[in-house]
Image (cartoon, grey):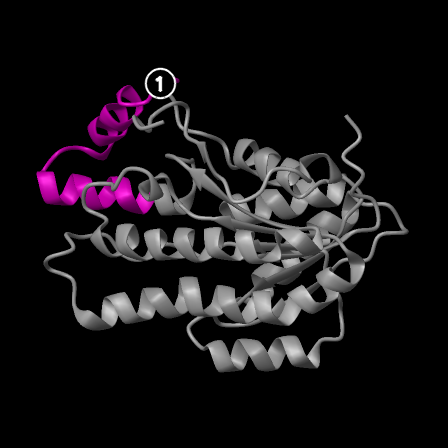
C-alpha cells in the first residue's frame, strides 16, 4: 500500500528511544522529512545519524532540543524554528508508578504539564500550517489505561485520561480542516519504560523480575510483549493519506490485553 507520505514533514516527540524512535524511523522510511525533538542532544544526534544513513538524499532530517517540563521554553524553541509540519507525534515518557492515593499533588501537576500542556503548546504552534495545507495528522501515543486503568499507575491513569479527552475534543474541532487527531494506546511494549515497571513490581512484591515478566506476558492473549516497531507501524498508517477518514479514535496496540471494546 502506498501511504503517500513522501515529502511530508513530521515532528516526532520523545524520539531518542522506544516507540518515539521507532516511529521516527518508520516515517523516514516512507519518505517523510523527520524532525526529532527531545531533551538529550547527544541521543538526538545519534538517532539523527541513524535515520540519515537509511534515507534518500532528497530527505531533510533535523532535531530540536526541548525539555517538556517547561511549556514556555518549548514554545520558544518552536517559535525560533521556522519549519512547518504536516504531522505531529505527541509522545512523552510516562510518570512514575504508584497508587493514586499515595501520589503527591506535584506529581499530578508535573505529569499534567508534560503530557497535556506541552501537547497543547505543540498543537497551537503547528495547526495553523496544517490548516493552510488542508492536511494534518496529530497522533498522541498514550496508553491502554485510557480504556482500562492499570494497577499501580495512578498518576499515569489520571493524566492519560485527560489527554484522551482533550484529543477527542480537538478531533471534533479540527476535522473540518482536513486534520485528524487520534490516539494510539500501546500495551506492554519492550522499552526501557516497561523494564522500569517490571522492576518496580518486583521490588514491591518480592518476586523475581523474570516471574513478573512472565506473569505480565500470560495476561496478554498474544503471550508476548510488543516491539516498538509494531506500534510505530500503526502510528505511520494513521499519519498517512490512507487514514484520512479515521478521526477521534483510541487505537489499542496491545496484543488483545485490554478487556473492554
Q: How many marks?
A: 1
- Tell me the quadrant of the picture where the C terminus can be found: top left
Q: Is residue 46 or residue 175 the one in the foreground? A: 175
Residue 114, x across and y down, in percent: 41, 66
Residue 224 is left or right of residue 46, and the answer is left
Q: Quadrant of residue 49?
A: bottom right
Residue 8, x across and y down, in percent: 79, 51
Q: From where the camera sits, is residue 48 visible?
A: yes
Task: Tell me which residue sits at (42%, 36%) in the image.
Answer: 189
Task: Tell me which residue sits at (19%, 71%) in the image.
Answer: 105
By secondary structure, the bulk of the magenta-drawn segment is best described as helix
Residue 157, x across and y down, in percent: 28, 50
Task: Tell me which residue sits at (55%, 31%) in the image.
Answer: 230
Q: Residues within 10 Å of mark 1 (few under 14, many from 20)?
A: some
Q: Is residue 124 above or below residue 18?
A: below
Q: Is residue 63 or residue 181 the one in the foreground? A: 181
Magenta residue span: 195-222
Residue 36, x across and y down, in percent: 64, 59
Q: Is residue 37 above or below residue 229?
A: below
- Say whether residue 220 is magenta: yes
Task: Tell me which residue sits at (9%, 38%) in the image.
Answer: 206
- Tell me the quadrant of the picture where the N terminus can be found: top right
Residue 31 is left or right of residue 90, and the answer is right
- Say whether residue 178 is magenta: no
Q: Is residue 225 or residue 47 the one in the foreground? A: 225
Q: Is residue 35 above or below residue 139?
A: below
Q: Is residue 206 or residue 158 the one in the foreground? A: 158
User: Which residue bears the numbered disc 1?
Assistant: 223
Disc 1, SS:
loop
Amino acid at each position: 500500500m502506498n501511504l503517500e507520505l513522501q515529502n511530508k514533514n513530521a515532528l516526532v516527540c520523545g524520539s531518542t528511544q522506544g516507540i518515539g524512535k521507532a516511529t521516527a524511523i518508520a516515517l523516514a522510511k516512507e519518505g517523510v522529512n523527520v524532525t526529532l525533538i527531545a531533551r538529550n542532544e547527544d541521543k538526538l544526534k545519534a538517532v539523527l545519524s541513524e535515520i540519515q544513513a537509511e534515507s534518500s538524499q532528497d530527505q531533510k532530517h533535523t532535531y530540536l532540543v526541548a525539555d517538556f517540563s517547561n511549556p514556555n521554553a518549548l514554545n520558544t524553541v518552536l517559535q525560533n524554528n521556522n519549519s512547518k509540519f504536516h504531522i505531529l507525534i505527541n509522545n512523552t515518557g510516562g510518570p512514575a508508578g504508584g497508587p493514586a492515593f499515595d501520589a503527591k499533588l506535584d506529581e499530578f501537576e508535573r505529569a499534567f504539564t508534560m503530557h497535556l500542556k506541552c501537547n497543547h503548546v505543540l498543537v497551537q504552534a503547528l495547526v495553523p500550517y496544517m490548516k493552510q495545507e488542508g492536511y494534518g495528522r496529530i497522533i498522541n501515543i498514550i496508553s491502554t489505561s485510557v480504556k482500562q486503568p492499570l494497577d499501580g499507575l495512578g498518576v499515569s491513569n489520571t493524566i492519560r485520561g485527560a489527554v484522551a479527552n482533550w484529543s477527542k475534543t480537538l478531533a471534533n474541532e479540527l476535522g473540518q480542516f482536513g486534520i485528524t487527531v487520534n490516539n494510539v494506546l500501546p500495551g506492554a511494549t519492550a522499552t526501557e519504560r516497561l523494564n522500569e515497571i517490571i522492576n518496580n513490581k518486583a521490588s514491591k512484591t518480592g518476586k523475581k523480575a523474570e516471574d513478573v515478566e512472565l506473569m505480565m506476558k500470560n495476561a496478554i492473549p498474544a503471550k508476548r510483549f510488543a516491539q516498538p516497531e509494531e506500534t510505530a507501524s500503526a502510528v505511520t498508517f494513521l499519519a498517512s493519506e490512507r487514514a484520512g477518514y479515521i478521526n477521534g479514535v483510541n487505537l489499542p496496540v496491545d496484543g488483545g490485553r485490554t478487556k473492554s471494546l
